Every structure is written in structure tokens, then in C-alpha cells.
Amino acid sequence: MRGPARLLMVLAFAAAASAAAAAERFVPGDPGFVVANVSRAAPDAELRARILAWQQHPADVAASVALAQAYFERAHARREPMFVGRAEALLAPVARNGSAAQRRLYAEALQYRHDFSAAESLLDGVLAATPRDAAARVQRASIRLVRGNFTGARADCALLVASGDSSAAIGIACLAEALAGTGGLERGRALLSNYPMPAAIEPAVHAYLLTVRGELAERAGALDAAIADYGAALALDPGSDAIRAALVDALLARGEPESARDVSNIERPSVAILVRQVLAAGEAARSDLRPRAEGLLALERARGDAAHNREAAMLALDAGQVDAALAAARANFSNQRELPDVRVLARAAVRAHDAEAVRQLRDWLKTTGFTDATTEGVLAGAARG
């Protein structure tokens, strides 16, 4: 589940430039590598109007929220992280003491760059003041699920279900996911199977329900059912990279690289999708795609952006760089513990023959009750030696 004050832009740019300068300078090896798309940096008429409205009344909460939301929408639609940076710069000076809407949006920016702890703390404050803020509760539940705090998420999900309003459907899927993280995989699947889908459900919410149902099916070993659900979810929400990545992973697991290539072949792919293009590609295309993916990951590090450690581990494993893969997978798992995070750590630990990493993952699985047929199969291979 993923959610949806202002520093002057020159200050935001200066901060980004400072972070990049502090790291080793990144020079793309490919002369065709796109560092920034200046043409898409120029706002369209609608965005210019929102910017102007905010400039005329910078203390107006509604204007600040409207502009920040517009930035997030463009970041999602165009896969341009710079718009998230602009939203964060806009909200940062007022977020701590701002309106609930400002704090929720700022938490979304923090979540985007994987600062989950700070985002959750901000949402704690919102919910302490306004316990019925469903949007904040959805965001906090999402963060808790990502971090593997299934018990905490379960409490938020249950309250969403109990609300009986439009948040109830989200709460059902959220609760199923939380149950599955604490030893109740089949209970979670049954909850979704028996849930009467509302006739007027929003497409994005419907897609979320299908995605969770697909993930739980995949974890139970029902790969065909998972792929069907992921495909239906992506048709409802084609802009979701998370759903697209899940479908590509499942198709690759079923041994269908051509289908995976078709799904991952989109314009302006994010890092997550570009890495999956590499994994699905044939040898000829892979030699072209891999440098682009590695270049984007290097650019993230150079700019001080949140690192895609999950994708870095996947890419390293594919190249046979098991030590680098394990280091990235471990760093990733310290911050986020979704299904792909668990699987890539299992694979990296086993491939690296790191008994301690295997033991630590087994302990986490036992403590939480998180079950996944694929992960169990990978770890069983390690036990056989």
C-alpha cells in the first residue's frame, strides 16, 4: 500500500547539489544516458496556475496543499522524482506544526525517500490529535506493513474496517495482509475471498484488493491465481509500478520471460521497472539495459537519494555478484520487509553461503509468523547444503 512550507526552490536545489558534491562524482558511461529531462521540468498551464496561486498567498494552507498534491500527481504520472523533492521543499518549513493535510503530504514525501521512521512519527502526531483521520491511518498502516510491523498495522487496519465508510474496503485488504504477516496466511486469504466487493468501489482500491489477494496466493504457492489477480489489478491501475513489478516477478517465476518483457516495456521506466527489464531481457538486450540500470542506481547514490537497495541486490544476484547482493539485501531488509525484500535476502544469503544471514532470516520468519512458499523453498535448499 502506498500513500498519496516551502523552502525556496533555489534552497532545495542547493541542498541536492550539496549532497551530490559530497559523494563521488557520477559520470554516465553511456553518452545517451538521461541525467535530467529539462523539457518535462517546465510546468504545464495547470501547474503554473497552482504555483502562481501559492506565490500570491504562500501562507494559505489550501494553496500549499493543492500545489504539493499537484507535484505528487506529476511525480507519479511522469515517474519524475524531482516533483517529490519540490513537494517536500514546499511542505518542510510548516509540516511539523502545519495542518493534518500538510503533515500527511510531508509524510508521503518522507515515505517516498524511505525515511519510514520519521514519516510514521509524523502520522502518530496527526492520529493522536484526530483519531478519525482515515487518510493518516491508511498511510500509517502502509508504513507499518512495509517495515514488517504487522501487529501495529493490524490495529490500524481493524479500525479502518470498523469505520464502515469508504475506508472499510482498504481496511479489509490491509487486515488480510497484516494477518498473513503474523502466521495467518490462510485466514487472510479467506477474508479476501469472502469479502463482498462493493459495486461502486474505486478502481485504485479495487486494484489494491486484487494485489493483496494475488500476493497472498503467491505466498501460498498458487502462482497462476496470483498472476491473474496481478494482471487484473494492473488493468485497473496501469500507473502503479508496484503492481507492475509484482506481475513481472511472478511471470519470471513461472518461466515466462517474454510475457515479463511485455509487461515491463513501458515509457520512462522507474528504477524498479528498469531492473526488471534487465532480468527479463535476452542476452543481447541485457548488455544494453544493465549499464542503464546500474547508472541510475549510481546516480541515486551520487545525488544522495534514497537507495533502491532491493533492486541493487536483484541486479547483483543476476550478475553473480553474491557478496554485493547480500550487502544490499541486508541494508534493504533493515528498513523494509515486504515480500520481494524477504525473497531477495533469502536468495542472496543462500547464494553467498552465509549461515548467519540465513539464521537471522529464519529467526525473523519464526518470530513474526510470516510464511512464503518460495522463501521456504530457498532456505530449504540451504539446509540441504
Image: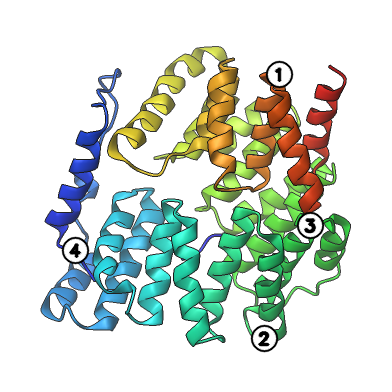
Please give left or right for residue 368 compared with residue 74 in the image: right
Q: Secondary structure at mark 2?
A: helix
Quadrant location of residue 303?
Answer: top left
Q: Secondary structure at mark 3?
A: helix
Q: Is residue 256 visible?
A: no
Give the residue at mark 1. 353
Give the residue at mark 3. 180
The reply to whether the C-beta atoms of the residues labelled 4 and 2 are less than 8 Å apart is no
Mark 4: amino acid: Leu
Quadrant location of residue 146?
Answer: bottom right
- How far, Cα to Cα, is label 1 from label 2? 48 Å
Which residue sits at x=44%, y=70%?
Answer: 122
Instruction: Compare marks 3 and 4 and give the one earlier in the sequence.
Output: 4
- How far, Cα to Cα, is label 4 from label 1? 48 Å
Give the residue at mark 2. 163
Assess disc 3: are there few (<14), some (14-19) or many (≥20) residues with their C-alpha within 10 Å of its C-alpha.
many
Count of residue discs: 4
Q: Secondary structure at mark 4?
A: loop
- The circle on residue 249 is none
Which residue sits at x=36%, y=50%?
Answer: 78
Where does the image place residue 304, in percent across and percent down from the top left? Answer: 32, 40
Mark 2 or 3: in front is: 3
Please give left or right for residue 356 compared with residue 263 in the image: right
